[in-house]
Image (cartoon, rainbow, N blue to C red):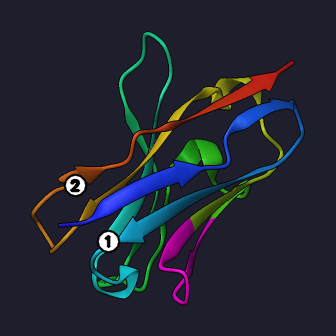
Amino acid sequence: QVLLVESGGGLVQAGGSLRLSCAASGPSINTISVGWFRQAPGKEREKVSVLSSWSINQYYAEAVKGRFTISGDRAKNTMHLWMNSLKPEDTAVYYCAAEMAPGLGYGYWGQGTQVTVSS
């Protein structure tokens, strides 16, 4: 079992930056897959970025490639999502989620953090 707690959301102007953090308690992030998802009002939840212990490739949605960077802090068992050049369409509730083994799906979710980008 893993407990995930997000932080770092807020209000920022277009073009600005934010860093989201996802603190994990339980298994080490080095042994699981942690992803960032977002859901805007009236839209389906979408996968934004994934850092997986069983893949050397990081995943980024096309909409955020070149602007967002995912990273892990092993000492603090925390994942970060660095978001630059933010756009109003990035406005959403951002969630981190954990997949415990390949193919199991993201069964553990944080409470979410609101990101609002003003134009």
- For image coordinates 63% across by 48% down, the residue present is 64
Q: Which residue is mark 1?
A: 33
| Residue 67 vertical position relative to residue 111 in the rendered view, above or below | below
Q: Are marks 1 and 2 in contact (CB under 8 Å)?
A: yes
Q: Which residue is mark 2?
A: 106
State the image quarter where residue 45 is shown: top left
Q: Which mark is residue 109?
A: none
Residue drawn at (34%, 82%) of the image:
55
Relative image position of residue 95 (x, y in whole percent): 44, 43
Tell me if residue 61 comes above or below residue 32 in the rendering.
above
Tell me the element at label 2: loop
Left or right: where does residue 11 sit relative to residue 22? Answer: right
How busy is the neighbourhood of tag 2: few (under 14 within 10 Å), some, or many (20 plus)?
some
- Does the magenta stretch mainly form a helix, a strand or a loop? strand
Residue 101, x across and y down, in percent: 15, 74
Dot 1 alpha-carbon crowd within 10 angstroms: few under 14, some 14 to 19, many 20 or more: many
- Amino acid, disc 1: Ser
Q: Nearer the viewer, residue 71 or 109?
A: 109
Compared to residue 48, the image places residue 115 above or below, namely: above
Q: Residue 7 location in percent, x, y?
A: 60, 50
Q: Image quarter for residue 30?
A: bottom left
Quarter of the image with the N terminus is bottom left
Q: Is residue 49 left or right of residue 108?
A: right
Where is residue 48 shown, x and y percent of the image? 49, 48
Is 78 magenta? The answer is: yes
Q: Which residues are magenta?
A: 70-79
Above or below for 70 versus 76: above
**Sequence order check: which comes first, mark 1 or mark 2?**
1
Residue type of the residue flagged with mark 2: Tyr
